[in-house]
Image (tube, grey):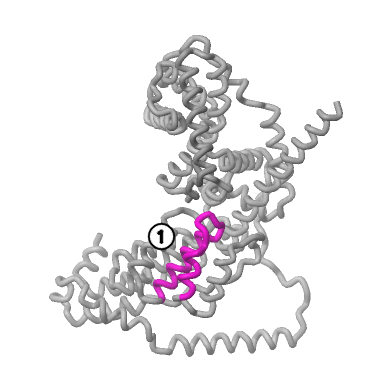
Amino acid sequence: MLSKAGPETAGLAVQKVRETDLLAAAIASGDREAEQRFVQQYLPRVRAMLLARTRNAEITADLQQDVMLEAICALRRGQLREAAKLSAFVLGIARNLLNSHFGNAAHQPVSLEFPDNIPDLTKATDEIAKRQEGELARCAIASLDHVDQSILHMTLVDGLKPGAIAERLHLSPDVVRQRKLRATRKVVNLVSKLSQNKSGAHLHERDAL
Amino acid sequence: MTICNGAPAEHFALGYVEGTLPEVEAERFEEHYFDCPVCLKHLQTIQTMAQSLAQQSVATIEQPRLKMPIAWPVWAWSGGAVAALLLVSIFTYKSLEPKLAQPTVAQSELKSLPQAATSSQPVRASAAAVHLSQLADLTLPVYVVPNLRGDGSDANFETGMREYAAGNCQDAIVTLRQVAEQSAEAHAAEFYSGACQMRLGDFPAATRGLRKIADSGDSPQQEAALYILAQIALAGNDPVAAHMYLERTIALRGDLEQRARQQDRQVAELIAMSNPAQGEHSESK
């Protein structure tokens, strides 16, 4: 799936291990800023994972807090054995909480140790950036052909399979698959381009000031 | 640590968000994007897109069947009729042609028939085996150059597919093997290599590659991969596997649905014919 590392990436890997090592050590020694950095780094990843798994923004919002708190508590206790595996460590916690959420959905919510001085998780969520991304996505979607919009809507919102979409739109399933992939690629590229332009514009504005 | 150009996200993110990615692939993708900002960004954009789509009520259009926008002249209709007649006659000729490739497979695989079936209905069973393998459609799937292809397609893929289109399966396999794993065409290259291996009679290798495509979730080649796997199973006189793959093909409700349905019925008939007691039993159920 992925290309293996060369000497340059090996250097990057060493640097990353050092950074995570320092981050984990700083959290274990009670550095609150390090906790904030940890949250900023991992909350978006955890959110993306929970959203994909639950497909529910509310459950995601609840669980992401639990995951981050559980991770911070564990890091404070120095439970991370290998600094290189910080991502796997956080991912593992997220999977466990997700499983117990669905496994115990009918029972009581998971009780967590609630630590003092927890980092402000809301700071990690840049609402303005989020809203801007939403706008960019809407612009990109609007630039698509109407049929492509419908295909994406039926796929991502209604959860329909290409066969069912093809039947509704009187297309062949292969065409639906091709158009779906093509439209997704187009939106992703356009959002990336627009956001680069936007950040470029911001830099210009800042320079002008 | 890896160098990543976002290819994993391009390949897996949509299926991951849709929930159609197999669990193993989903977990591998999670492990990857937790360390890869490029793929994380790609995934987040798809999630934002899904949320935007959910918010904005896109009027899902039920496209009417396309009608002729212009009045076609009579010569066009007559030309079309001649072409259709030609196609029908070619099709009829082809269907009357004896299947050359299939009997070799059928003969070699006849021994693998269950003994119980042969002992109870020897004549019927061997006839069923021959028919079962003769049901197998071992022709290469037609490759149509997609008009939706973006720029920057893999040169090896293009060369390989030219060889494939010319029927040079051996060369196509060699060239398609060189398509980079991260390339957008990697999936398609694996599929067409599998089809070539099937054509060359290397069923174990074909099955390995095609299974990967069939089990890796939604892709343009998934349906065809399942269908070919069913054909390989038929050629190998394995009705159980053939039935399973045909059922999976049908479930996708794609272009091959009708063909798969028809074949599945024929398989069921042949099984019932080779073992009538079992057929009666299943009917009474």
* Residue at image mark 1: B248
Of A118 and A178, the residue lying toward us: A118
Asked where in the image residue A71 lies, by quadrant, the reply is: top left
Is the magenta region chiefly helix, strand or loop? helix
Residue B219 picture location, percent across and down: 51, 57
Tell me which residue sits at (43%, 62%) in the image.
B249
Q: Give, as a single range, the part of the protein colored magenta.
A: B171-199
Left or right of B34 on screen, residue B206: left
Where A64 sits versus B206, above or below? above
- Residue B183 part of the magenta-drawn span: yes
The three-letter code of the residue at mark 1 reads: Arg
Residue A133 picture location, percent across and down: 69, 36
Q: How many discs appear?
A: 1
- Residue A52 part of the magenta-drawn span: no
Where B3 sits versus B122, above or below? above
Left or right of B118 on screen, residue B131: right
Of B221 and B182, the residue lying toward us: B182
- Furthest residue in direction right, as rendered: A208
Residue B222 picture location, percent across and down: 47, 60
- Secondary-structure class at tag 1: helix
Residue A79 picture location, percent across and down: 38, 21
- Is residue A102 something that shows in the picture? no
- Is residue A87 something that shows in the picture? yes
Label 1: chain? B
- Callout 1: 10 Å neighbours few (<14), some, many (20+)? some
Tell me which residue sits at (13%, 76%) in the image.
B119
Where B130 sits versus A115, above or below? below
